[in-house]
Amino acid sequence: MNKLQQEELNVLVEFDRICRKHDIIYSLSSGTLLGSIRHHGFIPWDDDIDVNMSRSEFNRFEKIVLEELDKDFFYQSFDTEKDHYHAFSKIRSNKVELVEKSTEYLNINHGVWIDIFPYDNIPDDITLRDEQKKKVGFYNKLISLFVYTFVTDEDKGKKRIIKNIFYHLNRIFYRVNFLLPSLYKKRQYWIEKYNNEKTEYANMLVFNYNDAIYKSTFIRNEVLDSVTSGVFEGHEFLIPTAYDEILTSNYGDYMQLPPESERVSNHEVVLRDHRNA
């Protein structure tokens, strides 16, 4: 493990401690789940940790996390930091910062983190399902426009100019943008709209930033809270019982390594260890 991965593992161990103490069901997710099954730890080129849980388990977790969390960590959500714009939550280290270029100007805790994704119901009716997906995606794009817009090397011409304008305006005005609270509220309404109904599937709507993500995060409600133990970097964590079904759906032949050209990190970051300051 590199230093970043070790710090992320420390955060995951603390998260797992709290969940086990209170019998809260979660599971490793996405690349972290794949790493557990294929590598028994981090995918060597991966640089983040993801966990997920049903909305009901997530709500239970939120009720106790602030009281239970060790002082070396910080729980980041709408309620703990008003400038946290995601619909999902994070646990961050208070000791080691991982500053992303795209969010360095935000007035938030920038500690090394793990992402915590709640799953929410999606309707069985395809028309209603499509409406929900489009509404959540629409509000995510608007919120990102006002908070998370940054210029990449792929941006050219007018697109680069427009994104550059928003990037610099956001650095100055995002804290006083009167539209954001309303956008957050509307997004959350559509995310949780069908949670009181019995549906066949749930989805990671909180991370619905494009169609590819939406299509890759379907899960049957009947298996969402069914978990078993899996090994990750010498520790036991919870993984979905249906891990083969989930990984096959997301990655195909998931035991096959990708081409070397695709073995790259996802974030442009700076690591700062305040323990040595």
Image: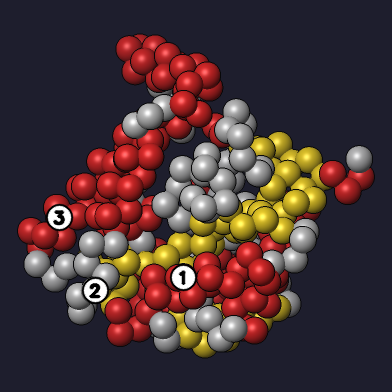
Query: What color scheme is it?
Result: secondary structure
Q: Quick check: can you spot residue 33?
A: no
* Mark 3 vs 2, N-terminal side: 3
Which residue is rendered at x = 21% and y = 47% of the image?
135
Does dot 1 land on a helix, a strand or a loop?
A: helix
**Residue type of the residue flagged with mark 3:** Asp
Q: What x and y, as percent, mark residue 92?
A: 66, 54
Q: In the figure, residue 6 lies in which quadrant?
A: bottom right
Mark 2 crowd level (few <14, some 14–19, many ≥20, 10 Å Cα): few
- Residue 69 against residue 98 in the figure, above or below: below
Does dot 3 land on a helix, a strand or a loop?
A: helix
Q: In the figure, residue 144 lies in which quadrant?
A: top left
Mark 3 crowd level (few <14, some 14–19, many ≥20, 10 Å Cα): few
* Mark 3 vs 1, N-terminal side: 1
**Residue 130 got which mark?**
3
- Residue 112 against residue 6 in the figure, above or below: above
Does dot 2 land on a helix, a strand or a loop?
A: loop
On the image, numbered disc 2 is attached to which residue?
A: 196
On the image, numbered disc 1 is attached to which residue?
A: 58
**C-alpha gap between disc 1 and disc 2:** 15 Å
* Mark 1 vs 2, N-terminal side: 1
Quadrant of the drawing holding the N terminus: bottom right
**C-alpha gap between disc 3 and disc 2:** 18 Å
**C-alpha gap between disc 3 and disc 1:** 24 Å
**Residue 182 got which mark?**
none
Q: Are marks 1 and 2 in contact (CB under 8 Å)?
A: no
**Residue type of the residue flagged with mark 1:** Phe
- Between residues 181 and 24, which one lies in front from this camera angle? 181
- Between residues 42 and 223, which one lies in front from this camera angle? 223
Which residue is rendered at x = 59% and y = 78% of the image?
19
